[in-house]
Amino acid sequence: MHRLRTTVARLRPLTAAQTAQSLSQPRLLAIEGGLRTFKPTRRLNTSVVAEPFLNGTSSNYVEEMYYAWLENPRNVHKSWDIFFRNASAGAPPGAAYQSPPPLIGSSQGLASVRGLVGAQPNVEKLVEDHLAVQSLIRAYQVRGHHVAKLDPMNISCVDFDDAPCAIGFQNVDIAFNQQIHLISPGFYGLVESDLDKVFRLPKTTFIGGSEGSLPLREIIRRLEMAYCQHIGVEFMFINDMEQCQWIRQKFETPGVMQFSLEEKKTLLARMIRSTRFEEFLQRKWSSEKRFGLEGCESLIPALKTIIDKSSQRGVESVIMGMPHRGRLNVLANVIRKELDQIFCQFDSKLEAADEGSGDVKYHLGMYHKRMNRVSDREITLSLMANPSHLEAVDPVVQGKTKAEQFYCGDNEGKRAMSILIHGDAAFAGQGIVYETFHLSDLPSYTTHGTIHVVVNNQIGFTTDPRMARSSAYPTDVARVVNAPIFHVNADDPEAVVYVCEVAAEWRNTFHKDVVVDLVCYRRNGHNEMDEPMFTQPLMYKQIKKQIGVLQQFAGKLIAEGVVTTQAYEEEVARYDKICEDAYARSKDEKILHIKHWLDSPWPDFFTKEGQPKTMNCPSTGISEEELNHIGNIAASVPEEDFTIHGGLSRILKGRANMVNQRLCDWALGEYMAFGSLLKEGIHVRLSGQDVERGTFSHRHHVLHDQNVDKRICIPMNYVSPDQAPYTVCNSSLSEYGVLGFELGFAMASPNALVLWEAQFGDFHNTAQCIIDQFISSGQAKWVRQNGIVLLLPHGMEGMGPEHSSARPERFLQMCNDDPDVFPKLSEDFAVRQLYDCNWIAVNCSTPANYFHVLRRQILQPFRKPLIVFTPKSLLRHPEAKSSFDHMLPGTHFMRIIPEDGPAAASPEKVKRIVFCTGKIYYELTRERKNRGMDAAVAVVRVEQLSPFPFDLVKAETERYPNADLVWCQEEHKNQGYYDYVKPRIRTTINRTRPVWYAGRDPAAAPATGNKPTHLAELQRLLDTALDLEAFAGKV
Ligand SMILES: Cc1ncc(C[n+]2csc(CCOP(=O)(O)OP(=O)(O)O)c2C)c(N)n1
Ligand SMILES: [Mg+2]
């Protein structure tokens, strides 16, 4: 740190207040001659009940009025004039007062007030002083957090230096001597002598408690207590009056932050656990990375408070996501993972009992059902496994939470909720945080409020906040969704717990996001091996002087008499013994079971041992009757008096015609798959940008009434009375967030088909982190299966470098099947191969095959991610239609589609096998026909690219003994499938023959933007593929 920062207390005037200030110009003149003082000589005796405005706290004000009136009745407002005249004439209580003429609603009223203000300096001063006090209160509410003592180190992480301060109201150090001074010229003209004047409090504050007026001195003192101590409340940007009032009440009401003896003891016990756990690990494994919590030990009571309070409000399941910092502590002391299971993770000699590569201990997840002692209710806590990529787990947690809510019919988020824990640098820096926030209020994505807790240790690895973010706080991103932000000094456990109570109540009242910013420090380096003095010398000199929070807090409670020193020490010894005992037990563990770290078990889906119940996949075909039924639904508008667009009527008519002809196009094939699964009780959820209609206007799963706003109809939900519900939802324009969300949704249950569709396949790369870190490697790292489906529109159609390629090469490169080993074939080879792979990649050329592969996703006895490269022009291609015959019982997904034309009839005459995948098949066969080469060239479609159908490709190569082998693709040579399929085809033929290439040349961009070039390239590659001499003489 090149300089220490100190918090500068600054309050700036507000727009409303500025208006008040401009109104107050005459007033300054009025008081120039010095302050008036009023010496009351007699009191008014009037019943407060009958005239409630005459209560004790307003007496100063009334007296002021009274003496002004005595001086000259015209000094006061007419209503006061009448009142005092009546009272002096002996009117009984309640009879003296007559309501004043209305001020609002008529310009005449306003004009008369203006006249009054100008003409009567006393009233004017009174109004101005009240406005000033109101502005003062508001200034505290808006900016009190700027001056709150949030930083345990006193090295502020918040830099307001750049914000000019037009008027100064200096922070009042009430902690010392209760002395309050206003500096000249004071706040909007309020000066020292105003401090003892009593002011009526506006409705927008609760500092009065049961009192409606207070002396200014007390107003300031209470505001300082509410807004400028260890809690900084940032909420005035929220544009909902009720919510603002709710927060004010929680923080302003006098005495609101009080704890019973029992609560203090529980808090101390939690602080002991949190602190001593880290100390224990440090003692036993001083040279191991664990990303300890030292400096933010109050995170543990913070989370436990949130969970306790939420459980009391009826929450049964809490899903958490968090980064590395303090994760082991959370597992041990919040989720209550057995300590020996945690400690044995430090034993490097432990043998892995499960498949896969496993992951490091501070990434693993956990699921635990237990009784919550505070609420006496059962609660399930899960901590999601996550990759190192900070914040990537955020949308995944949201998706899983949404799914839990969905499956238990919890439409308001009363039973399941999420907590996300963040680091300060990551929260500010990672865009996924913003993307996740933007899901928070969308009907199909909301989890009805997430509680965010930021471990704000004011550093990210070696980078301090001045270099890490441009906002004052790391939490500013939350303001976009109007989430209140509670900053709190983490060295004050009571303040932390209070703030967490309010956060939990907020979430369970308004069902909106809220942020708790634990301002703390990091006692060690980034991990326990790092030397922080290299880069943060001043900060760490300060940290070395810092007394640990437990020691401070225990000292406080001992001084208060809440516990004795002896009781405290006994509690510490008790927990230390728990750790020692668990440590001894952990030595007995010889095997590491990653399965014990599952965050989302599917107990009924697998056998007790966690294996698939069978290794078969039944036929994925459905009956003719069902095809007809679903087809008719797809062609209908099942609601009465529902007017659809004329163009859509034509589309539906076209569907009806296809059904009559026993045909399916792509959209209808998808309809058949979804509809049949729904009928079988499988929930289907399709999410992504514009999926309801479909980017290519082919799907139309949501019909819109042309005459009634917001009236929609989803025919898919009319398939059968006892069907599962169908969710189809247009998403926000986020790939990273939404794909992460759907992945999380798919985690919750194996009995759902969850699909995410990219608008165009290439856009998946903004979600690359979810694909790389979760989808392709999730099972290997966390032994957790997932059946998410990615639909990625792909194809070179002359649309230019964007929108063309879903980058199949990237997905194929991440497949785990060995290109050089021909697998052992068995009867269940096809299923076993699927079971062994990390994910499935297909490029279907027919609607029937697309239908089958979607159904297979559910009918196979395990779950694997499925990547589907989906077509664009094929959606309407007249040949890309499938007969019902290919979808009937007994049919199934075809991993390859062999040649079935003249070439197949006389295989020995075939000179070439052209292997291909996807849409190029139609271009190839058209060209082959044009050239009259149907008998000479066999075209074989590889529909399942990965796991590679070694067995079937081998059979095809053997079927045509005199043919050379060509791989044809429309993509460039360094892209597409070539690098993936070539070594695998070579393996199937024992590397005896070459595999020639027909496709576009290598290129940097996926496609040309020039249509003639596109067509020329296409023609050239077709020429090569069908020119039987093209490879003659080559080796
Ligand atoms: C997406 C991503 N980028 C970079 C990193 C490397 N990295 C690990 S921890 C860390 C600093 C995190 O700081 P902060 O979020 O404040 O958490 P803290 O470690 O301070 O608790 C960085 C940059 C990462 N894990 N993930
Ligand atoms: Mg940090």
Image: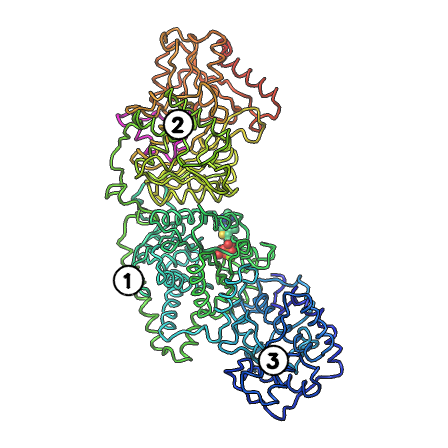
Of 570 and 600, which appears nearest the observer? Answer: 600
Which residue, as the protein is rendered here, is positioned at the far bottom? Answer: 41
Instruction: Give the quadrant of the N terminus.
Output: bottom right
Measuring from the top left, give residue 598's x and y in whole percent.
Answer: 33, 48
Main secondary structure type of the part rendered in magenta: loop
Q: Which residue is mark 1?
A: 581
Q: CA distance from mark 3 to mark 1?
A: 55 Å
Measuring from the top left, give residue 402's x and y in whole percent.
Answer: 40, 48
Q: Secondary structure at mark 3?
A: loop
Q: Which residue is mark 3?
A: 180
- Disc ID at residue 669: 2
Q: Earlier in the sequence, mark 3 or mark 2?
A: 3
Find out whether the residues at labels 3 and 2 contact each other: C-beta distance under 8 Å. Answer: no
For label 2, the crowd category at 10 Å Cα-Cα, with few meaning under 14, some 14 to 19 and many 20 or more, is many
Mark in the foreground, 2 or 1: 2
Q: Does any atom of ligand 1 lie closer than 8 Å to the CB of label 2?
A: no
Q: Secondary structure at mark 2?
A: helix
